[in-house]
Image: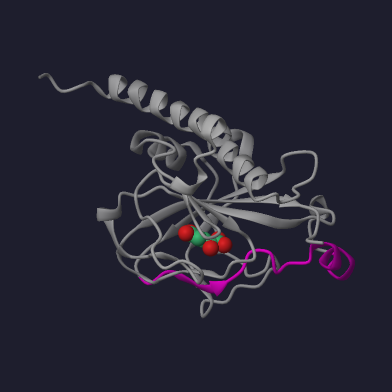
Amino acid sequence: MAEKSIAEQKEEFSYSYYRTIEQFDKDKKWSDCHNDMVYTFSSVISKWDCKDIIHGVEQQWRTPTIGGKDNHDPEVRKGQIKFPEPAKVPYGRVITRCMEKVAAEMDIDVGPHTDIDMQLTKYQNGDFYSWHTDDDIDYKKRNEEDSNWDPKYGNKIRKLSAVLQLSDPNSYEGGELMLKSNAVISRKQGDLIVFPSFLEHQVAKVTGGTRLSLVLWYKGPRWR
Ligand SMILES: O=C(O)CCC(=O)C(=O)O
């Protein structure tokens, strides 16, 4: 049988994606995709779409900060990041839809409007991010104490985090995303891993090649 063209494969892929989402809507088959508090959406986007995301964000790479302040600590985190405008990220809506579903499923209060930030992350040989949580920033306190802090955050905190695996797992060594609650996290390109931002996680040191990820945070009012 003749091999399918990329266009045909892409089309088939997007049908299967929408079927998956419809399936969740109809049957609430959440047990298939979550383990404890960690949700994995398999093949949310295709490998071609991963490349579109990587090449579609034009900003310059920069050194990451810790906890949002102008604080670089290569003992804690090494790599490169950029913060794209969510509306400009190809397939951004497809990805954030999965986060909206997890927020609803876990009954996480994310406020009346979807408010998601995105970060594109690049880890090369020797880069890593040690154990941390994403919700340890008290934005309101920061606003009051730190005149450089971006007031757009208001008093929201990061409630739900997600990592989209953008690289072919055979193109890098090390660089595993690890969560303290859950030992095995998918490395598959196009898989989306969603978890509450209070869960401790790390990215192991990359020992060869380059790993790229799209990290997303769904923000909302503080935990009550
Ligand atoms: O790149 C990843 O897999 C996770 C990055 C991360 O933990 C973060 O930026 O907070």
In the picture shown, does residue 52 fall above or below 206? Answer: above
In the picture shown, does residue 187 fall above or below 100? Answer: below
Q: Which of 198 and 120 is in front in this view?
A: 198
Quadrant housing residue 115: top right
For the point 65% across and 47% down, the residue is 103
Is 80 left, or right, of 97 in this rendering?
left
Name, please, the residue furthest toward the front. 27
132 magenta-colored: yes
For the point 61% across and 68% down, the residue is 133
Image quadrant in which the C terminus is located: bottom right
Image quadrant in which the N terminus is located: top left
In the picture shown, does residue 170 fall above or below 90? Answer: below
For the point 67% across and 69% down, the residue is 67
In the picture shown, does residue 192 fall above or below 209? Answer: above
Over which residues does the magenta segment extend?
126-147
Rendered location of residue 21, percent (x, y)? 50, 32
